[in-house]
Image (cartoon, rainbow, N blue to C red):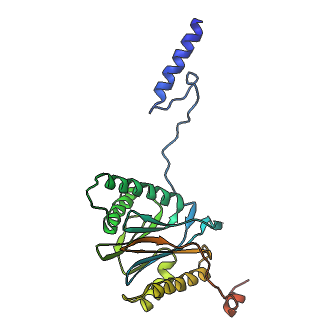
Amino acid sequence: MLAAAQKDEKKDQALKNLVGHPQTGRDCPFTLLNSPISHTQYPYVTGTSVLGIKYKDGVLLASDMGGSYGSTLRYKSVQRLKPIGKHTLLGAGGEISDFQEIVRYLDELILYDNMWDDGNSLGPKEVHNYLNRLMYNRRNKFNPLWNTLVLGGVKNGQKYLGTVNMIGVHYEENHVATGFGNHLARPIFRDEWHEDMTFEEGVKLLEKCMLVLLYRDRSAVNKLQIAKITEEGATISEPYAIKTHWELEAFKNPATGAVGSW
């Protein structure tokens, strides 16, 4: 009996010591391997481009719903557009799990702001500034959140659209894009965007850019959402596909004329 009591006492003491102080050895009730702190070295499940433009009444964002596991288009129903509070929309390219963590941070931020119950609410510029500090802080810890974010919103009649990447580089613009969209969609925006675009014109422009990305970006999927935010609030469309045409000669044999091609 005495031996059993001593054994239980030793087990209880070992459990207490494990709180914040992992131990190994025969006297511990279970073994914890000592391991170094690990950080995300490379993203695993990622989303591709997010597009954003200002239009006459507010801001429009667009993204597809693909989630790639490496080069495999593994998931096809990943929503990457989220409303944040009353005045803001957020879209993300990059690591999906890191985006979920960012949304959790923002939910806590909005909840804390609402608890003041002072009649004020965070606008898109304040949320953008918060994300700038968050991304730069994590970068300085060598543990970045592996995302590029697009943030748009409307508050007190002022439209706002900005972006921030995984190392904290940020800016505000009339049209923004992440990933491949930076190379393929932004030139189209520069040619065709204008400040007085109607909602229908804005959607048409975004669909045109998403079609180009679908043709040229291997990680894109033909299942997209378009979100809008105005003074009245934010709405996100149901997923839908856009009409494609693959009978172009360049698509039939893309290697024709390539030197050294198989």
Image quarter for residue 150? Answer: bottom left
Does the image show residue 68? yes
| The C terminus lies in quadrant | bottom right
**Which residue is at the front of the view, 201 or 207?**
201
| The N terminus lies in quadrant | top right
Residue 52 horizontal/vertical position (percent): 44, 77
Does the image show residue 144? no
Residue at 56%, 36% (x, y): give it. Answer: 33
Residue 145 horizontal/vertical position (percent): 45, 59
Residue at 49%, 52% (x, y): give it. Answer: 39
Would residue 121 appear left or right of 165 to someone viewing this image?
A: left
Query: Going by the picture, which residue comes out furthest to the top?
Result: 2
Q: In the displayed structure, would residue 195 be above or below residue 179?
A: below
Residue at 47%, 88% (x, y): give it. Answer: 201
Would residue 215 appear left or right of 162 to someone viewing this image?
A: right
Q: In the displayed structure, would residue 250 be above or below residue 13?
A: below
**Which residue is at the front of the view, 115 or 175?**
115
Image quarter for residue 154? Answer: bottom left
Residue 47 horizontal/vertical position (percent): 55, 68
Q: In the displayed structure, would residue 183 be above or below residue 115?
A: below
Residue 18 horizontal/vertical position (percent): 48, 29
Q: In the displayed structure, would residue 157 be above or below residue 195?
A: above
